[in-house]
Amino acid sequence: MRALFAVFLVLFSLNSTAQSWPSKPLRYIVPFPPGAFNDTLGRTISTELSKTLGQPMVVDNRPGGNSIIGTEAAAKSAPDGYTLFGAALPFSVIQSLYKTPFDVTRDFAPITLAGISANLLVAHPSFPANSVKELIDYARRNPGRINYGSSGNGTSVHLSMELFKSMTRTYMLHIPYRGSAPVVTDLLAGQVDVMFDNVPNVIGHVRAGKMKALAVSTAQRSALAPDVPTVAEAGVPGYELAVWFGVLAPAGTPRDIIGRLNTEIVKVLNSPDIKDRFAKQGVEVRTSTPEQFSEFLKNEVARWARVIKDAGIKAD
């Protein structure tokens, strides 16, 4: 009887929590500085959920430590439904590159996948290669003479090129920056030879003739750059990297609250206005159930662990 009574108290407590939630402001942790799409996603969700949940939701940018600072803050937050976390592709890579005080598959409760995007392989106009095949040939003839910039270790920008190097057996010098903007600035100035970056960040420069586009990282071409081939089409069969975005909560957040958040966020993201707005930024809205997102994350973590180990990728 005592055991049954204890179970009843737990269930009653969870149900009461879910029914009274939310009764105070919520926060959405973004482990990157303002300006990137993960920040845009967080602000969009926060604005809309503030209306539907009847409580303010604020975006809490926690950049630094290659996203470890913000991710740790989210992992250690109370699992009471008042903290959300905006994850992106680096989330599935981080513990394969660094010793982290959290486990991405154990310490978080997935809510929903939010969207996917492509990275664009670009070069300075004066760079001798005008295609992926020419880049590979030039890199093989000049090992170590080509430099590439990235927005930091473990980012999709970094991993896109490391995967490319591994699959093409080429060597290019990695120059990590703190963010994408300074890399773009140096590439425009001719101080960086090539880079991968999210399509919206560089497509304007490509259209203006200040950069040349060689390929996109995804399996399909980007709607923002339909004339640019995929890396696989351009000479590296099997190459594919999709930049993904998603929303999580600390592990232990009541399932009823996770379900409610999933319903509300999926509704926001699939609204025609949001889908159109994100599409113009090069992001395809793609939502899921918590269970589907959990399986997706497990596969991503396993995939990148293999890639990093096989390619010998290190945090520079």
Image (cartoon, grey):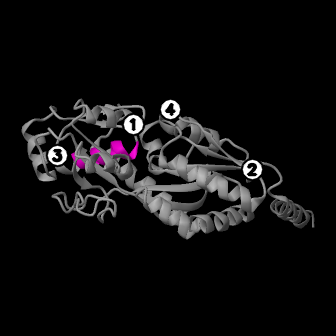
Viewer-side label of 4, 1? 1
**Where is mark 3, residue-wise?**
169
Secondary element type, mark 2: loop
Of 132 and 52, the residue lying toward us? 52
Tell me where the magenta segment starts and ends, as one range: 155-165
**Where is mark 4, residue-wise?**
65
Nearer-N-terminus badge (2/1) = 2
User: Residue 181: which numbered mark, if any?
Assistant: 1
Viewer-side label of 4, 2? 2
Q: In which quarter of the view is residue 174 placed?
A: top left
Cβ atoms at labels 4 and 3 below 8 Å apart: no
* Circle 3: residue type: Arg
Viewer-side label of 3, 2? 2
Secondary element type, mark 4: helix
User: What is the magenta segment's predominant secondary structure?
Assistant: helix
Viewer-side label of 4, 3? 4
Nearer-N-terminus badge (4/2) = 2
Secondary element type, mark 3: loop
Quadrant of the frame with the N terminus:
bottom right
Check residue 157 for magenta coloring: yes
**With respect to residue 191, does 241 lie above or below?**
below
